[in-house]
Amino acid sequence: MRLSALPILLCLLAAPLAAQDDPVAASATPQAVKLVELNEGAHPLMREFFGRVRAKETVDLAFQVSGQIVAFPAVEGRPLAEGQVVAELDLTPFRRALERAEVTLAKANRDLARLQELSNSTVAEVQIRDAQTEVELAEIAVEDARDRLEDATLETSFDALIARREVANFSTVAAGEPVVRLHDMSELRVDIEVPEILFRRAADGNGVTFTARFPGLPEEYPLALREFEAETAEVAQTYTITLAFTSEIPGWALPGASVTVTAMAPRDTGDDILVPETAIVFRADRTPGLMVYEPDPEETSGTVTWQEVKIEVRDDARIAVVEGVEPGRQIVAAGASGLTDGQAVRPFTGLGN
């Protein structure tokens, strides 16, 4: 009797071990899947680009005459209002030249007057005409001397920021030699490189909006399109567009500061629903479908059901669902092809969950 009971006892002890090796028991915990909710229309297309702040214009100012600089109040990094003096040459030689031209003009006028008084006697008509020519030439010389005197003082023609002094004070400069570099701060701009598709939308004014964000700061500043280069880059097939800040920005944001530009463009998909490629599950007959999630109201999990849909591939390779599923439903966004119809799953909420 004792020996006959031994097989029964061994069977009873092995039963729990067999249960642990049962694949059904091991799969009692539903598989975690990433879910997305289907929405009508589409979220805006968002792209980020790197850019740098620049001035509206950057100009190298130079004297139109030669001379020695005797006044150079421009300080690097300081602003200058429109009409303020940037630099000034020694005016003494230019004043003397103007006085010399004025004296020559006065003499020419006297000579002409004397010849006109004698015109009825011994003076030929050609002499009078020559004297009139001398007066006209003297008047031109006076205008030239006055212009050269004015050109000896360099002034700003716009509200500027002194970027760099090119020469030192009391140095002698030639006409056309850069003296100082100025930034036109009336409007700050940003240049970015954008792909062809986004460029077409921006150039057509097709609802594309731009904002700028400085590194480490949450604030966003609106930008407006100002101009664009009508040719692409040689390598990347991108266009350079110029944007301008339309609101006040921090005073420390000078030309050269880096910014992140965000471009938002509406997707032209009408009422279609966009889905990721990894959400499409094809059957053996190449019928496309989605794994639709059905939550269990009493549990934190649910099941997935394969549902046939009609899809279209857009010109930009995005997949749109045009028929077969209602907006608001949740579908498996990634790894849907590895699931089976009716399989129990749970929403993926993060690592460790």
Image (tube, rainbow, N blue to C red):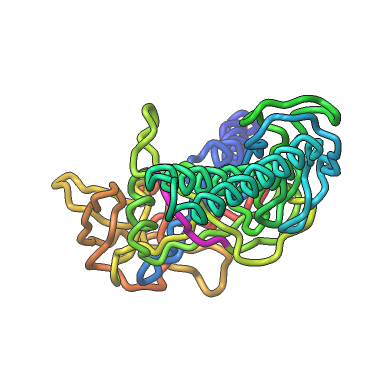
Question: Which of these two is toward me, 309 or 187?
Answer: 187
Q: How many marks?
A: 0
Residue lying furthest left in this view? 285
Q: Main structural element of the magenta stretch: helix, strand or loop?
A: strand
In percent of width and height, residue 33 lies at 49, 52
- Please state if 132 lies on the left or on the right of 324 as rendered: right
Residue lying furthest front in this view? 121
Residue at 77 percent of width and 45 percent of height = 86
Q: Which residues are magenta?
A: 223-229
Q: Is residue 295 above or below residue 81?
A: below
Q: Quadrant of residue 206?
A: bottom left
Question: Which of these two is toward me, 198 or 314?
Answer: 198
- Please state if 268 lies on the left or on the right of 344 as rendered: left
Name the quadrant of the N terminus.
top right
Q: Quadrant of residue 344?
A: bottom left
Is residue 82 something that shows in the picture?
yes
Residue at 34 percent of width and 60 percent of height = 274
In percent of width and height, residue 318 lies at 31, 51
Is residue 48 something that shows in the picture?
no
Residue at 41 percent of width and 47 percent of height = 129
Asked whether residue 138 is drawn in magenta, I would say: no
Residue at 29 percent of width and 53 percent of height = 319
